[in-house]
Amino acid sequence: MNIYPLPPSALKGEGMTSQRARDRLVASLKEGGIRDARVIQVIRDLPRHHFIDQALHPRAYENTALPIGHGQTISQPWVVARMTEALLEFGVPQKVLEIGTGSGYQAAVLAALVPQVYTVERIEELLRQARRRFRQLGLNNLRTKHDDGKLGWADEAPFDAIILTAAGDAIPSQLLNQLSPTGVVVAPVGSPSSQTLIRMRGDGQGDFIQEELGAVSFVPLLGGIG
Ligand code: SAH
């Protein structure tokens, strides 16, 4: 299986000077049980510092969530890797919907691995910054929308995979309705203090196979637009 080639613009510049920090990050992902070589390669190549404020650049390759403003965070790299791996395990989805664009980092990781990424964010300013980052990196297989992601993206459904990067008390049924019959959803589900990463897979007959992939910690899935 081929990784979508990242455009050279995604790999150049300041990022190269951080190669040792990136190598350390990759080592810690592997120690943490990340196995998918495609995912590891993208996390090694994609400049995470490009998705955060300059003041935080020295911490860009730490395996931690970091603030991105508006009370939101760029997810921890291990979590991004785990969710991406879980999404790709049964084959590469053609069309993926992400709810919660935030910094744009998870969407960019996906854009390097699958043909088409659709991402929805409720805070307009975050979305504006993410769009600029995608443009600067030359990522052109991403489409973005300012909306309440609980509604999904009906005009573009069905999706082969849906990923939520904010936690609700359940996976919104409108999203499940926009999943292809054998599609995969990966989402944190639970209360602010206790969340579990859930994977649901359509069995092709209208039912879902549900698995728990471990404890996680995400910002809440909110309603409406910001
Ligand atoms: N994937 C992001 C994670 C950002 S944090 C990254 O890689 O940086 C989660 C994001 O989900 C926040 O930006 C938050 O504003 C957004 N969010 C929360 N509820 C939402 C909703 N109902 N619709 C769309 N976005 C939502």
Image (cartoon, rainbow, N blue to C red):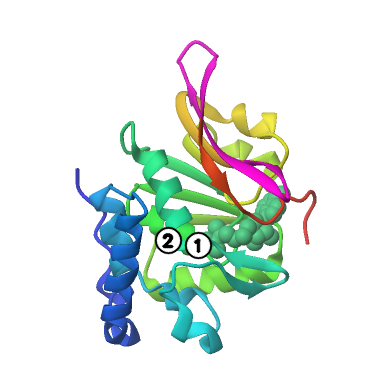
Task: Return the x and y of residue 172 as percentages of the image width and height.
Answer: 69, 34
Label 2: state its secondary structure: helix
Quadrant (top left/top right/bottom left/bottom right) for the C terminus: bottom right
Q: Which residues are magenta?
A: 189-211
Q: Mark 1 or mark 2, which is nearer the start of the sequence?
A: 1
| Residue 117 appears left or right of 225 | left
The amino acid beneath tag 2 is Ala
Mark 1 highlights which residue? 76
Q: Main secondary structure of the magenta part?
A: strand
At 33% from the left and 81% from the top, the residue drawn is 15
The reply to whether the magenta stretch includes residue 97 is: no
The amino acid beneath tag 1 is Gln
At 64% from the left and 44% from the top, the residue drawn is 195
Residue nearest the observer in this picture, 23 or 184: 23
Q: Quadrant of residue 219?
A: bottom right
Label 1: state its secondary structure: loop
Q: Is residue 35 visible?
A: yes
Q: Where is 219 relative to 175, above or below?
A: below
Between disc 2 and disc 1, the foreground one is: 1
Quarter of the rendered image showing ligand 1: bottom right
Mark 2 highlights which residue? 108
Mark 1 nearby-residue class (10 Å; few <14, some 14–19, many ≥20): some
Mark 2 nearby-residue class (10 Å; few <14, some 14–19, many ≥20): many
The reply to whether the magenta stretch includes residue 198 is: yes
Task: Return the x and y of residue 154 as percentages of the image width and height.
Answer: 62, 36
| Residue 82 appears left or right of 36 | right
